[in-house]
Image: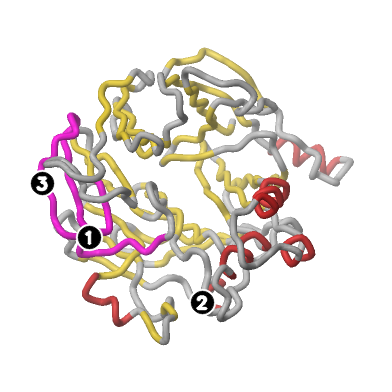
């Protein structure tokens, strides 16, 4: 990445702060700024998805969903090599998609698919492959946030292939009776496992939801899990997966819990997702926790849609209008700010970034020959 001595301090929008007087002044003093600290440019016509970066920070791994190409760059964004490993071929991962792709230390790349696990060198030559013994349970294709590789361990939110019959009852997944949290070695042997917390909304209100898997972040001897339908972050010991602590995120009035889909309704999970709120991601930056959720959609807007169709023009226009992020900042367990920024943020491990736009800019304003990734910290 190209280093900046100093680029900008972006003031947090305080429109959601209703306080005035000494208490508001005290809150302002505690609130950090979103600070642009670095950037990288990639010579591609299509914005690639950031999949991972090596532990020494020397390599970045991207995927172009238009060309199905894996892209390896150096830390400045210069492309080292690309390869299409989908479909057929001796080095293929024998699938048109994957669930996750991660660096193994600094010299190998691990690709997880429903059909198997594939290990590559940095030239994208296949080193070895093996059947998937643990199936990741997610509806996210291409980069599930509930799969991590660190040291000799892998973390997954999933189930053993041999246990499939144990987790289903009358076509409903029994989320509270099975150890979906799993730490394994690279051979697929489960070393540690645990159940999800009983306080999750899909445990409290069983039914069909659009997703169950968490966003996961490893920090030394702990792993933090954010199950996106419940406003909590849970802390487990790692790799032992013993629940140690939790943090209630205390969202404001823009948050509305997602309800289970009505039975016998084919697309119900999508309309309940549109109606309610879900957390998108979280990251620790310096001494702060940053997280965000998407606003809810008014009931009358959702109820007016044709429930036989998902993704038509009216559905997409309502999603674009209402499903905007609300950001929260915590210091320790204290929420010190909640509000909106004119920016779409994303994370990958310890990196907080946006693509082709800084706050106040429109990423779709102009066509680009290169794609710029902007990196931030809270300071």
**Label 3, on which residue?**
128
Q: Residue at x 26, y 66 (%)?
A: 192
Judge whether residue 222 can be spotted in this image.
Answer: yes
Which x, y percent locates residue 169?
39, 85
How far apart marks 1 and 3 lie (CA) works out to: 18 Å
- Dot 3: what SS? strand
- Which segment is the magenta one? 111-138
Q: Residue at x 71, y 33 (%)?
A: 12
Q: Is residue 334 visible?
A: no
Residue lying farthest to the top in this orientation: 5
Image position of 253 (left or right of 173): right
Identify the residue position indicated by label 2 in the image: 203
Q: CA distance from mark 1 to mark 2?
A: 25 Å
246 left or right of 336 in image: left
Foreground pick, 199 / 368: 368
Q: Nearer the viewer, mark 2 or mark 3?
A: 3
Name the residue beneath numbered marker 1.
184
Q: Are marks 2 and 3 in contact (CB under 8 Å)?
A: no
């Amino acid at each position: 990445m190209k280093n900046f001595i100093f680029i900008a301090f972006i003031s947090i929008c305080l429109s959601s702060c209703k306080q005035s007087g000494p208490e508001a002044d005290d809150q302002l003093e505690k609130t950090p700024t979103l600070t642009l600290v670095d950037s990288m440019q990639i010579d591609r016509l299509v914005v690639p998805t950031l999949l991972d970066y090596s532990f020494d920070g020397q390599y970045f791994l991207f995927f172009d969903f238009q060309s199905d190409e894996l892209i390896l760059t150096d830390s400045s964004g210069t492309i080292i090599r690309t390869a299409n490993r989908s479909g057929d071929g001796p080095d293929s991962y024998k699938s048109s998609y994957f669930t996750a792709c991660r660096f193994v230390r600094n010299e190998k790349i691990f690709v997880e698919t429903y059909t198997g696990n594939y290990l590559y060198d940095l030239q994208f030559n296949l080193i070895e492959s093996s059947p998937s013994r643990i199936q990741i349970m997610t509806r996210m294709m291409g980069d599930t946030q509930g799969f991590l590789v660190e040291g000799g361990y892998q973390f997954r939110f999933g189930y053993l292939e041999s246990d499939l019959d144990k987790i289903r009852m009358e076509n409903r997944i029994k989320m509270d009776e099975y150890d979906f949290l799993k730490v394994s070695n690279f051979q697929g042997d489960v070393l540690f496992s645990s159940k999800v917390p009983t306080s999750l909304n899909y445990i409290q209100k069983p039914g069909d939801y659009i997703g169950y898997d968490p966003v996961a972040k490893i920090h030394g001897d702990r792993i933090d899990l954010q199950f996106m339908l419940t406003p909590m972050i849970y802390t487990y010991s790692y790799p032992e997966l013993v629940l140690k602590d939790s943090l209630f995120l205390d969202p404001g009035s823009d948050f509305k819990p997602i309800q289970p889909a009505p039975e016998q309704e084919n697309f119900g999970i999508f309309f309940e997702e549109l109606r309610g709120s879900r957390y998108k991601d979280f990251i620790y930056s310096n001494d702060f926790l940053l997280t965000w959720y998407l606003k809810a959609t008014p009931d009358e807007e959702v109820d007016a849609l044709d429930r036989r169709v998902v993704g038509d023009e009216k559905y997409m226009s309502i999603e674009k209008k209402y499903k905007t992020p609300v950001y929260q900042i915590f210091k320790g367990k204290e929420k010190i700010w909640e509000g909106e920024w004119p920016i779409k943020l994303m994370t990958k491990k310890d990196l907080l970034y946006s693509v082709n736009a800084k706050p106040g800019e429109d990423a779709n304003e102009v066509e680009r020959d290169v794609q710029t990734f902007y990196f931030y910290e809270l300071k």
